[in-house]
Amino acid sequence: MNIGELNMSAEIINPNSCYIAGLDSPRNLAFRRHHRMLMLQRLLPVLVDVLNAQQLADVSCDLELLYWPVLGHAQSPCFFEIPAFLGSSTPDQPMEPALVVERLMAAPCPPLPVDVAPAARNLERLRKHFDLSPSQRQRLLCAYLNYGGAAWPCFELPAPALRTLLAAWWRVDLAAVDAALDDRLSVLGLMELPDPCDAGSDSCSLASRLSIPSAVVQALSLSYATDAELFDALQLTV
């Protein structure tokens, strides 16, 4: 078929994201919190090895904004000066990257929901129906977790370095990464085609490799009595 921690007391939502029914249901929320922390703690040591000092400092600021409750902040930090007409305030001082990494690595992984989340059930249905490889499923999972830019920091790397990072993050070999990044998931309608690397800098962003249509996020977030209902919902996304 061709188809188009402290336990965080409140979900961090990108205000530019479209409303997705079911995305913030208790079971899906618990599923996303668990897997975000699990995958983040796999990603952080890789970032420390791959990124240079300036990139790591920028990524650390992103992580503070994404995971500020886990890092012990009372509210989301602000790293730029607010204009006087908006109520001038002194910018917050970013934490040292090493401390951000240390605290996130030590954070407890939130538990999975007692009952299987709709998103978990639907991702498993897709894996079985389309015979997705572990790396393809990881890419789809990481894209779902990051919808609205809510999970992973922003950075760019040369294409070969990004492939190496993904292999280490997903714990697969480079051939498996290439298979996950080919056009299959896009042809199926599950992922958007990534933007080509910038010809001048030969750099690629992580976000471009994890771009997922909002309609697919919607379909994955709802409960279905049968597999056919899920595939009917996904068919409507193309």
Image (cartoon, rainbow, N blue to C red):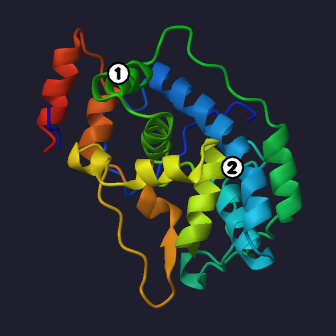
Q: Amino acid at mark 1?
A: Lys
> Is the Cβ of the residue at disc 2 closer than 8 Å to that at disc 1?
no
Q: Which of the 4 quarters of the picture holds residue 231?
A: top left
Front residue of 167 and 13: 167
> At x 64% / y 40%, what residue is drawn?
39
Front residue of 64 and 235: 235
* For residue 63, side relative to residue 166 (left or right): right
> Which SS class for mark 1?
helix
Front residue of 85 and 16: 16
> Looking at the picture, how far across and down is residue 135, in whole percent?
50, 40
Give the CA distance from mark 2 to mark 1.
Answer: 26 Å
Does residue 213 appear in the picture of this structure? Answer: no
Q: Which mark is residue 128?
A: 1
> At x 57% / y 75%, what residue is drawn?
158
Q: Amino acid at mark 2?
A: Leu
Q: How many numbered marks does the figure carry?
A: 2
> At x 42% / y 86%, what residue is drawn?
199
- Neighbor class of circle 1 (other Cα within 10 Å; few <14, some 14-19, many 20+) is few
* For residue 238, side relative to residue 53 (left or right): left
> Looking at the picture, how far across and down is residue 76, in whole percent?
66, 55
Disc 2: which residue: 43
> Vertically, is 6 above or below 63?
above
- Neighbor class of circle 2 (other Cα within 10 Å; few <14, some 14-19, many 20+) is some
> Looking at the picture, how far across and down is residue 32, in whole percent?
53, 32
Sequence-first disc among 2 and 1: 2
Does residue 187 appear in the picture of this structure? Answer: yes
Q: Which of the 4 quarters of the picture holds residue 78?
A: bottom right
> Which SS class for mark 2?
helix
Q: Which mark is residue 175?
A: none
> Looking at the picture, how far across and down is residue 218, in whole percent?
28, 36
> At x 59% / y 83%, what residue is drawn?
83
Q: Quadrant of the N terminus?
A: top left
